[in-house]
Image (cartoon, rainbow, N blue to C red):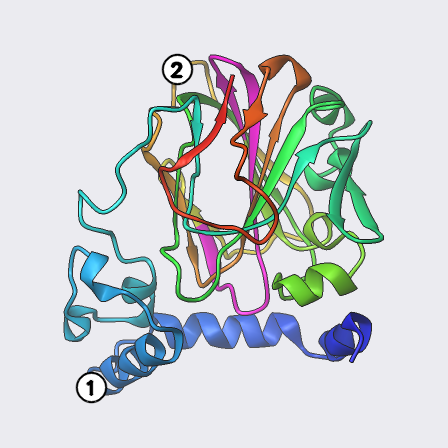
Amino acid sequence: MSDFWAVAPQYLLPKQALTRLAGWVAGAQWGGLTTAIIRAFVRRYQVNMAEAAQPDVAEYATFNDFFTRPLRRDARPLAPATWVSPVDGAISQLGAIVGDQVFQAKGHHYSTTALVGGDAQLASAFEGGHFATIYLSPRDYHRIHMPCDGVLRQMVYVPGELFSVNPATARGVPGLFARNERVVCVFDTPHGPMVLVLVGATIVGSMATVWHGVVNPPRWPQVHTWSYAAGEVGLKQGDEMGRFLLGSTVVMLWPGTAGLHFQPDWAATRPVRLGEAMAQA
């Protein structure tokens, strides 16, 4: 079956309604039923609970509490690198931004302007730069951490679709990551500006950041922007910056002036872990 036909039903599904329902279920406190749902999920996706700060699934009041569980402090040491992986996941794509075009999958590209919500001035800073896209599967740890030190400049909520973001959908839906609902975080770093985009998906109930809390819901019908004074929100490499309530994808952008060189073994489909070396200046 071609990727198009594999993802065609998603065009017909009531994705917003399904996402609201999933968010309601994930936030419900149903006691033993909640624990049973979590146990089934752990078995289905082979989640490694030994890494969790709280390995006993019966201690989680809601599915969301389980899904956004913190890890043990020693579970993800930081590598000595300029940039480290901000998440556990698998590399979807990475490489050079050609003009303003980011590679999604064979035959599909999208523009940096579309990705960041239509801000052409912001997007222009990344022309000729680099990008990395990391997919978080259901079994992964779903908190997002800083790949390097950064000072928050701006956060932008961009409304959009809620297609799945799995590899088959990335191959079958044009402009997927610039089409789905997303939260764009713009940081100033020691190596220039950096954009970190949290991309929503079907049944991703919400996205949250450590400085704002839950960003969505509400789901605004238009782009919504928050600006921050210099030094108001500063984060160190490895600090938590946000989380997904159910899985999704992170896209990162760097300017050409950052002098970024990806690790030689970083390539599409490769699994990665939070804190491992991603790139050097």
Q: Is residue 110 left or right of residue 77?
A: right
Magenta region, residue range: 186-207
What's the mark number on residue 32?
Answer: 1
Camera sees residue 214: no
**Which residue is drawn at the image coordinates 80% and 75% (left, top)?**
2
Q: Main secondary structure of the magenta part?
A: strand
Q: Is residue 281 left or right of residue 145?
A: right
Amino acid carrying mark 1 in the image: Gly
Q: Position of residue 226 (x, y in %)?
A: 54, 32
What's the mark number on residue 58?
Answer: none
Determine if the magenta segment contains residue 158. no
**Which residue is drawn at the image coordinates 62% and 31% (left, top)?**
253
Nearer to me, 126 or 63: 126
**Which residue is drawn at the image coordinates 60% and 39% (left, top)?**
132
Q: Position of residue 203 (x, y in %)?
A: 53, 69
Within the image, what quadrant is residue 32 found in? bottom left
Camera sees residue 35: yes
What's the mark number on residue 231?
Answer: 2
Structural distance between the alpha carbons of marks 2 and 1:
45 Å
179, above or below 237, in the image: below
Q: Is residue 97 left or right of residue 87?
A: right
Nearer to me, 159 or 163: 163
